[in-house]
Image: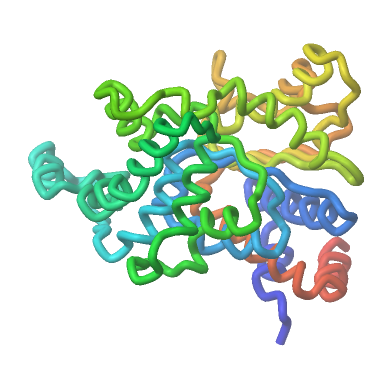
């Protein structure tokens, strides 16, 4: 019986099309971290609501992920899953819903995300009670923090008696405990971005207590230099949008805007359901990024056109097996590479 059933399954069965891209991306990821390289993740979509934390959290703890760029929604929804998990509802028949079905969901104070829903009172309003006093205190004392720093502080201060979800599956908690480098570009476009704006409008909080996106890039300049030392840092992207667009630009910005030497990204993989089309960045092929000096012709590049909720847990589980059994992993890779 192998200690690496997921890795062996992928190596043995995934030979063509998107399955081949998944296998090759997985092996290249392992080769990169095995030689001391780091991996930076960009996570768009509603991955926290889809419980990506089940595999993302242990991967962070195992050192397979060294930094993150996530949307404000993914950041807060990881916390929601921790404190309100029992109140989520699933809607497997959502494809057949009428408008009135969704009106009922609204009236029940639920917010649907495809086939699941976030409970407003148990998630939004519970977290609001904890974070607003922190914002008010920061306003009173003229303190300024990055958006994720407020959530790092919050997730570590929540009373464990309030946990409904498994804390080992909360990727935000895992990242906070390691003080993982993180950027939250466009955090204003999130539930708590809106809630924060309302308190700014009412005069209870000062907008300046949340550091800006520009300050995030300034922070990321230095974070990237540290991450890319040694064997370099790769870029693993789920979805498209600002979560990926923002951090990947750090390389050309350091090179052309700061006029400093910088290592290129050492690896690139994107799991996406976007099709290549006119002007679509999310659906752009990786080689287009060569023209923007974000990647080079030598960068290992992979595109997996599939559902990230299927592919990402598979890759992370296989990588965790590799991390725990490196010699056996390398033997399996050699065996199935013939």
Is residue 121 visible in this depiction of the protein? yes
Q: Relative to residue 48, is residue 220 depicted above or below?
A: above
Residue sitting at x 40%, y 48%:
77
Residue sitting at x 45%, y 58%:
157
How far from the left and from the top, in percent, is residue 128? 30, 45
Q: Is residue 264 left or right of residue 159?
A: right
How many marks do you count on the picture?
Answer: 0
> Looking at this view, is 16 or 113 the one in front?
113
Is residue 41 visible in this depiction of the protein? no
Q: Relative to residue 78, is residue 326 depicted above or below?
A: below
Q: Relative to residue 201, is residue 144 depicted above or below?
A: below
Q: Relative to residue 167, is residue 156 depicted above or below?
A: above
Q: In this view, does 48 lie to the left or right of 214?
A: left
How far from the left and from the top, in percent, is residue 89? 24, 58
Q: Which residue lies furthest to the front in this view?
A: 141
Residue sitting at x 73%, y 54%:
26
Q: Quadrant of the N terminus?
A: bottom right
How far from the left and from the top, in percent, is residue 87? 24, 61
Q: Quadrant of the C terminus?
A: bottom right
How far from the left and from the top, in percent, is residue 218? 69, 24
> Looking at this view, is 229 or 89 the one in front?
229
Display coloring: rainbow
Residue sitting at x 29%, y 29%:
204
């Amino acid at each position: 019986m192998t200690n690496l059933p997921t890795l062996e399954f992928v190596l043995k069965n995934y030979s063509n099309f998107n399955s081949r891209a998944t296998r090759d991306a997985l092996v290249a990821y392992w080769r990169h971290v095995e030689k001391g390289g780091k991996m930076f993740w960009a996570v768009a979509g509603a991955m926290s609501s889809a419980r990506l934390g089940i595999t993302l959290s242990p991967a962070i703890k195992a050192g397979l992920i060294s930094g993150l760029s996530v949307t404000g929604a993914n950041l807060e929804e990881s916390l929601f899953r921790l404190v309100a998990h029992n109140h989520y509802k699933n809607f497997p028949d959502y494809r057949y819903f009428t408008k009135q079905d969704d009106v009922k969901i609204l009236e029940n104070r639920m917010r649907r995300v495809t086939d699941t829903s976030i409970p407003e009172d148990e998630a939004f309003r519970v977290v609001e009670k904890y974070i607003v006093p922190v914002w008010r205190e920061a306003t009173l004392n003229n303190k300024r923090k990055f958006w994720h720093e407020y959530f790092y502080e919050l997730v570590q201060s929540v009373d464990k008696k309030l946990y409904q979800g498994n804390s080992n599956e909360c990727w935000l908690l895992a990242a906070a405990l390691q003080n993982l480098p993180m950027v939250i570009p466009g955090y204003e476009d999130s539930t708590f971005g809106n809630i924060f704006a309302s308190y700014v409008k009412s005069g209870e909080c000062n907008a300046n207590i949340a550091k800006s996106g520009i300050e995030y890039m300034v922070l990321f300049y230095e974070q990237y230099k540290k991450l890319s030392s040694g064997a370099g840092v790769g870029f693993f992207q789920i979805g498209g949008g600002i979560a990926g667009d923002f951090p990947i630009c750090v390389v050309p910005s350091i090179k052309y805007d700061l006029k400093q030497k910088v290592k290129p990204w050492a690896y690139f993989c994107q799991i996406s359901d976007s099709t290549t089309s006119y002007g679509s960045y999310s659906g752009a092929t990786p080689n287009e990024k060569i023209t923007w000096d974000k990647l080079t012709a030598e960068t290992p590049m992979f595109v997996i056109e599939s559902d990230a909720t299927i592919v990402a847990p598979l890759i992370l589980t296989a990588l965790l097996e590799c991390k725990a059994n490196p010699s056996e992993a390398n033997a399996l890779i050699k065996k199935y590479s013939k």
